[in-house]
């Protein structure tokens, strides 16, 4: 039986991309007595919590993590915290101070509040962006951390606070470092928009992929269903307490390969990639060494990248909005500023 069974679980950023899938994973496979979500909907969406109202075990509070009173309410009686709320990498390029306040400062505040409430397990969901570009590959947990952006730096600070809470106060903290997650509910719009969903929307509109730089930069893409299984496994694993654990597929995909997978999945091989000037702070190479995760939990990924891309194309094609309506919400240079509200929501990379 999962250690999450019978627990009251708080998911911060639970209306966001990864967070909402994690809520579904908990309710479907781990039988918690209650899942609470706190999200200010800066990047999260109520439509992602479609079970709200139909499942009495799910509760939602629209609030900002920097609101101390809201934290006290949310943490009352909670056994496990899964902390995903953050502002994303491109947001950090145009508003680094707020990015730090949310990703680092609010994480420290949440840890302190969780300690006061005697939370028995705290999983801090970090990011592979803490590493910067790979100095060797594949990248294990001992790989140097040289983040390229304030986002990566702020996530690294959150990691350090979680580890310090364990070493100083004996809190049962776990640091999870997901690499590049993709799948349904992923963001295409504003400064949360990611390369894969943005490219899919363009392909559905008959437009070519846009790639910043030469496209040889690589990422380790993992389907969101695998990511949330991994996070739940770490929350349930006693041996993971006090540890920092990488979570990825172990497969390296270039952005050029991603563009080809999208046009193939959309049935538009005629669309030829357009290369533009490189983005600032863009990591050149990422690929996980998942040995430690497998040793701790037996975790293995299940979704092949190309299959996941094809399914994601179909998911976007089935949206109520037309591809053209979605295209109108895409900002090509989404690191220079966005009208999207900048407050603590979940922005998955």
Image (cartoon, helix red, strand yellow):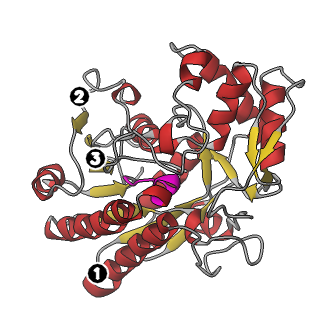
Q: Are marks 2 and 3 in contact (CB under 8 Å)?
A: no
| Residue at numbered disc 1 | 170
Q: Please, is residue 166 above or below residue 180 in the view?
A: below
Q: Please, is residue 277 above or below residue 96 in the view?
A: above
Q: Position of residue 64 (x, y in %)?
A: 23, 49
> Which one is closest to the eye, mark 2 or mark 3?
2
Q: Secondary structure at mark 2?
A: loop
Task: Answer few, some or many: residues within 10 Å of disc 3's Cα (few below 14, many 20 plus, some between 14 and 19).
Answer: few
Q: Are marks 1 and 2 in contact (CB under 8 Å)?
A: no
Is residue 233 in view? no
| Residue at numbered disc 3 | 6
Left or right position of 38 against 97: left
Q: Please, is residue 320 above or below residue 348 in the view?
A: above
Comparing 151 with 170, the one in front is 151
Is residue 84 in view? yes
Among numbered discs 1 and 2, the one appearing first in the sequence: 2
| Residue at numbered disc 2 | 56
In space, the residues marked 1 and 3 are separated at their CA atoms by: 23 Å
Comparing 318 with 272, the one in front is 272
Range shown magenta? 85-92
Residue in the picture at 40% in, 39% down: 339
Q: Position of residue 211 (x, y in %)?
A: 75, 45
Among numbered discs 2 and 3, the one appearing first in the sequence: 3
Q: Secondary structure at mark 1?
A: loop
Comparing 305 with 235, the one in front is 305
In reply to whether residue 110 is colored magenta, the answer given is no
In space, the residues marked 2 and 3 are separated at their CA atoms by: 14 Å
In space, the residues marked 1 and 2 are separated at their CA atoms by: 33 Å
Task: Answer few, some or many: residues within 10 Å of disc 1's Cα (few below 14, many 20 plus, some between 14 and 19).
Answer: few
Among numbered discs 1 and 3, the one appearing first in the sequence: 3
């Amino acid at each position: 039986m999962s250690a999450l069974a019978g627990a009251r679980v708080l998911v911060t950023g639970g209306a966001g991309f990864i967070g909402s899938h994690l809520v579904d994973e908990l309710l479907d496979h781990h039988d918690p007595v209650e899942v609470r979500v706190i999200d200010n909907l800066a990047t999260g969406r109520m439509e992602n919590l479609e079970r709200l109202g139909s499942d009495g075990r799910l509760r939602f509070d629209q609030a900002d993590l920097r609101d101390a009173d809201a934290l006290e309410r949310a943490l009352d009686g909670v056994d496990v915290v899964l902390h995903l709320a953050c502002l994303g990498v491109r947001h950090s390029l145009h508003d680094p101070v707020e990015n730090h306040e949310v990703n680092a400062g609010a994480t420290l505040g949440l840890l302190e509040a969780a300690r006061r409430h005697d939370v028995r397990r705290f999983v801090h969901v970090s990011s592979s962006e803490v590493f910067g570009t790979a100095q060797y590959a594949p990248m294990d947990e001992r790989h140097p951390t040289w983040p390229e952006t304030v986002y990566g730096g702020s996530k690294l600070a959150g990691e350090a606070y979680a580890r310090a809470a364990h070493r100083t106060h004996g809190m049962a903290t776990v640091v999870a470092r997901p690499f590049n997650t993709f799948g349904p509910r992923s963001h295409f719009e504003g400064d949360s928009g990611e390369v894969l969903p943005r490219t899919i929307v363009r392909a559905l509109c008959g437009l070519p992929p846009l790639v910043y730089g030469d496209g040889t930069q690589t990422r380790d893409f993992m389907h969101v269903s695998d990511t949330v299984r991994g996070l739940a496994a770490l929350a349930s694993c006693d041996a993971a307490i006090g540890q920092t654990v990488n979570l990825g597929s172990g497969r390296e995909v270039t952005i050029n390969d991603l563009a080809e997978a999208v046009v193939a999945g959309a049935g538009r091989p005629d669309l030829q990639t357009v290369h533009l000037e490189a983005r600032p702070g863009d990591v050149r190479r990422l690929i996980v060494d998942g040995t430690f995760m497998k040793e701790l939990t037996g975790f293995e990924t299940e979704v092949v990248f190309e299959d996941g891309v094809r399914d994601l194309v179909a998911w976007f094609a089935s949206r109520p909005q037309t591809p053209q309506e979605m295209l109108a919400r895409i900002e090509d240079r989404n690191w220079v500023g966005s009208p999207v509200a900048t407050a603590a929501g979940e922005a998955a990379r």
